[in-house]
Amino acid sequence: MQNYLTPNFAFAPIIPDHAAGSRVWDTEGREYIDLAGGIAVNALGHCHPQLVDALARQAAKLWHISNIYTTAPAQMLAKKLTEHTFADKVFFCNSGAEANEAALKLARKYARDHFGESKTEIIACVNAFHGRTLFTVSVGGQPKYSRDFAPLPGGITHIPYNDADALAAAISEKTCAVIIEPVQGESGVLPADAAFLQAARRLCDENHALLVFDEVQTGMGRTGKLFAYEHYGVRPDILTSAKALGCGFPIGAMLTTDAVAPSFAPGTHGSTFGGNPLACAVGNCAFDIISTPETLQNAVNQGKKLQTALALLGEETGVFKEVRGMGLLIGCVLADGYTDRAGELTQAALKHGLMILVAGSNVIRLAPSLLLNDEDLQEGMKRLRAAVASWLG
Ligand SMILES: *Cc1c(COP(=O)(O)O)cnc(C)c1O
């Protein structure tokens, strides 16, 4: 197919056409097991009948009206998000990057409102990923995504992930926010240590800085809890969500407390599409299904089964040296003889009818539907086994 899009994406050699549950079919009619989940987005698989219905019903009612007005779908979704989390207020936008952009702007504004003009510094982690706007690539800890776009916003420091001592050394009364992914997703599916997040909470409190959890990838059931911070017992001041929030319909959200929210006074921030009725109608339906004990338990159970099966495959073939993750966010670290070849294995998998992801160049990542059933799990593992065998030659 002729490609009319800018060359920043290296598209796979197949064209997906339609899908249902954890199966996808391409334009040639070939079937794939989807263990990639649209990069941790399709938390309820493809074309879930209740989501299709929620979207169609809202489509016949009201699509867009602007933030001059609020609507029932937006208020309902915000109510659900606040009732099930630490938060009291929600700002809606359209993506993870926008949610983080809002979080970082709010942290700067809150610090200025309460502590004056010099409290502007942001601390983030090496290898973090927070999105692709200029601010979020700068806060992200991967210079390859930011350096070509200099000059970059200032006042940003990076510390090694899971290094509480480095955070203690970097933080000061000039720090307005510390932003952390509870599991570093894009750079290799690396979970935080509880001690690191606990230290971050304490150090933020001591220095009057806000703790921001980027749960764009880990949120909405991905790790077996609604949000990953629940595993750690550490509450943030701001949390960002996107990816699975709309299960494929674009929506992002920034959650915060009644103490912080007032700094987003009328006119300070905005979004044309944020809180769009279509996105929020889908979000409400997705929330109702994801937040059930059954869905969350399925993520835990199938995550365990997948990790066990992947570890076994790693032992038998020698391709993985570690399998890690939480719930249905799983990373397989390539063994030393296969360093930086994750992309090759995903291509081999696609040839064998399986969609999987990389997380960096050295980790295979799985982020399937939270409703993944045994049949699709086993068929997916069978195809991965075949792909590994052919890759090894
Ligand atoms: C995907 C991701 C983002 C960016 O989300 P977009 O919707 O692509 O802007 C930000 N943070 C984390 C942790 C992510 O995984």
Image (spheres, rainbow, N blue to C red):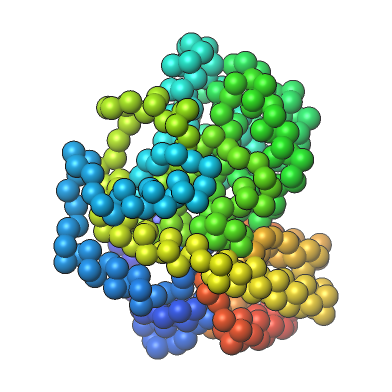
Q: Quadrant of the C terminus?
A: bottom right
Figure check: 355 above or below 99: below
Residue 15 image point, x, y percent: 39, 76
Residue 342 image point, x, y percent: 65, 65
Residue 4 in which image quadrant: bottom left
Q: Quadrant of the N terminus?
A: bottom left
User: Is residue 45 toward the left or the right of residue 250 in the image?
Assistant: right
Q: Is residue 353 visible?
A: yes
Which is nearer the eye, 221 or 168?
Answer: 221
Figure check: 378 above or below 215: below
Q: Measuring 70% from the left and 29% from the top, which residue is drawn there?
A: 202
Residue 312 in which image quadrant: bottom right
Which is nearer the eye, 114 or 353?
Answer: 114
Figure check: 239 above or below 316: above
Which is nearer the eye, 147 or 250?
Answer: 250
Residue 228 image point, x, y percent: 61, 52
Number of marks in the image? 0
Residue 314 image point, x, y percent: 78, 73
Q: Measuring 33% from the left and 52% from the top, which residue is drawn there?
A: 76
Q: Measuring 22% from the left and 68% from the top, which residue is drawn there?
A: 57
Which is nearer the eye, 178 or 49?
Answer: 49
Figure check: 320 above or below 265: below
User: Is residue 230 toward the left or the right of residue 26 in the image?
Assistant: right
Q: Is residue 6 visible?
A: no
Residue 334 in which image quadrant: bottom right
Q: Measuring 36% from the left and 45% from the top, which residue is drawn there?
A: 92
